[in-house]
Amino acid sequence: MMLLMLSVSVLVVAGMVNGSGHALHSSTEQMQQLQRSEVSMVNNIRMLVTDIDRLNNVLKGYIDSWEEVSELLEEESVSDPSLAYKLLKHVSEGWPKVDSALMTHTHISDIMDHLSKRADEELLPNSDDVMGASEALIKLSLIYRVNATALAQGHLQTEQDSHTHISNTLPLSVSELASIGLVGINKGHLGIGVEFLQAARTQAVAQQGLKQQKSLRNEDTYTPQKLDGLIKTAVRVHDHVLELRGERSLTHSTASRPLGTGVSGKLKISSDIQAKDSPDSIIGTHYLQLHTNETWMLKEKDIVEIKQTEKLCRGEDLRPIRELSTLFCQYMTGNHPWLLLAPFKVEVISRQPYITVIYDLITASEAESLWNYTAEGLHTPNHPMMKKNENSTKIDWSLKNQWVNESDQPQLKQVTQRIEALANVRAGQQHSRPYMVANYGLGGAYTPHMDTFGPFGITQDRLYGERLATAMIYLQAPKSGGNTVFPWVGAGIRPVNFAGVLWWNLLDSHEYDFLTKHAACPILRGTKWIANKWISYKPQWPGRNCPKDAAKRITQPNI
């Protein structure tokens, strides 16, 4: 173990994320704002450099003219006719040019003043933000199995699309690949970290033969020889951890097999897959039965949850065919007279618990208006359980949000009316909290969680009570990734523009439905905007009958 600690200390050359950054990578909108700002700033700098060059040429010419005269001038030499003439001519011809150039370029000071104020007026990324972005890339590689070598060459290639298509992106330099790899190792993702270090070495070797190698910026930091040493140490740590702890835990991940030589091959097998007759997944009734087993909950639940979440994020469905065959889509009319005239297309994702997708729950213009309204006010959510500081990067989500009242955006009243008709609830501004509009960022994700306040000891909303149901609307769907998944249901939902997802967090008896624990998968490409309306319990119970069956689930919208 001492060897392991010494090996790790050699690799930890980059600082850990300490939460002092602005978490800009956690919001695509704020990254786009940074991009627009940077375009403006670089244009200003480009103009400044051009104007300074012109001014510099005039000033340099004046200085050169003076140097020619001053070499001949002495203290009493102005009495010399020719030297006096030269002095007069120098100032007479030269200073008008200098004065004109200074007057022409008075805006230079304005540009410099504007540039100097940027750091005080704008959230700018620092090393912690870069570290957070590196960690996001590592997580994307872990979940979607991104090919690090292809990424280095400018191609975003995953295991799923390796034989179909490759998405173009910007290539990464040797130093960038090495830095990301070291962050991966520091975060415990040893297999992914080694992959990035190996990709860095491959690129470093390829660049050795380039004639312009000396002009490459920051590449000398990671030579092939230095990378060889880092890789050798990283592989030794990887194989040691794999042998002692297995392929995966809550704090580490490795490749499925040793990467070096000298390992016995007697790998530790995670206890959640130790029995040959164990099911491939634990979902539904099976999970609820295990939920009462305190030993299993403490030792196995979290790692099983992580693995099942990652499978769902990659597009798998963990349910048996017989269950999937009972699901369907249909136009919904329900019991509401308005829906007879304007039915919604509803897809049943799960029966137990009841999860549905309602297509075109919001219009394109309503969605665009909503995200434009919130774009400038996005901030890192305060997490009541984690109790992290604002803009912290060390929380279990990667997003920025803003709360919006229906009075702030009148079109939300129409959206609320649709939800009320579909779910047979009271969800207006006087009956529930505002909408939460959120924008996910680079690798934007949210780890498995329940939307309820309890039973985790968080104080409920005194005015509205517990969150009976969740209506989540996709204002903008990402191009790839970003699924909403329910690890204990075994189902996932691929985001669709303007669609809504409705599920019930409580049973009809007000007991918690633990199967509704869900997660947001990392964004692979594109932008993801959502709007959440949490339907509160207190405004509903006066109009709801007491259930005869305590385990009964609410099934609205009722097709």
Image (spheres, rainbow, N blue to C red):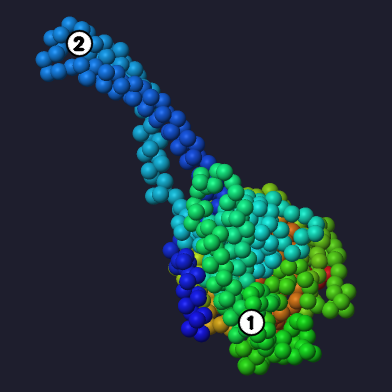
In front: mark 2 or mark 1?
Answer: 1
Amino acid found under the numbered disc labelled 1: Val
Mark 2 to mark 1 CA distance (whole Å): 88 Å
In the image, residue 81 above or below residue 240: above
| Callout count | 2
In the image, residue 298 above or below residue 515: below
> Dot 2 lies on which element?
helix
Q: Position of residue 61 (x, y in %)?
A: 34, 21
| Front-lying residue, 360 or 143 | 143
Q: Which residue is mark 1?
A: 263
In the image, residue 426 above or below residue 295: above
The quarter of the picture where residue 535 lies is bottom right
Q: Tell me which residue sits at (34%, 25%) in the image.
A: 60
Amino acid found under the numbered disc labelled 2: Leu
In the image, residue 54 above or below residue 258: above
Residue 43 visible in the shown view = yes
| Front-lying residue, 375 or 417 | 375
Q: Which residue is mark 2?
A: 83
The quarter of the picture where residue 503 lies is bottom right
Q: Position of residue 123 (x, y in %)?
A: 46, 53
Position of 6 compared to 181: left or right? left
> Dot 1 lies on which element?
loop
Q: Tell me which residue sits at (83%, 57%) in the image.
A: 341
User: Most extreme residue toward the left, as rendered?
Assistant: 76
Closer to the chain start, of discs 2 and 1, is 2
Quarter of the image that includes the C terminus: bottom right
Position of 258 compared to 316: left or right? left
Verify CB contact (< 8 Å) between mark 2 and mark 1. no
The quarter of the picture where residue 65 lies is top left
Q: Position of residue 450 (x, y in %)?
A: 63, 76
Position of 79 compared to 171: left or right? left
Q: Residues within 10 Å of mark 1 (few under 14, many from 20)?
A: some
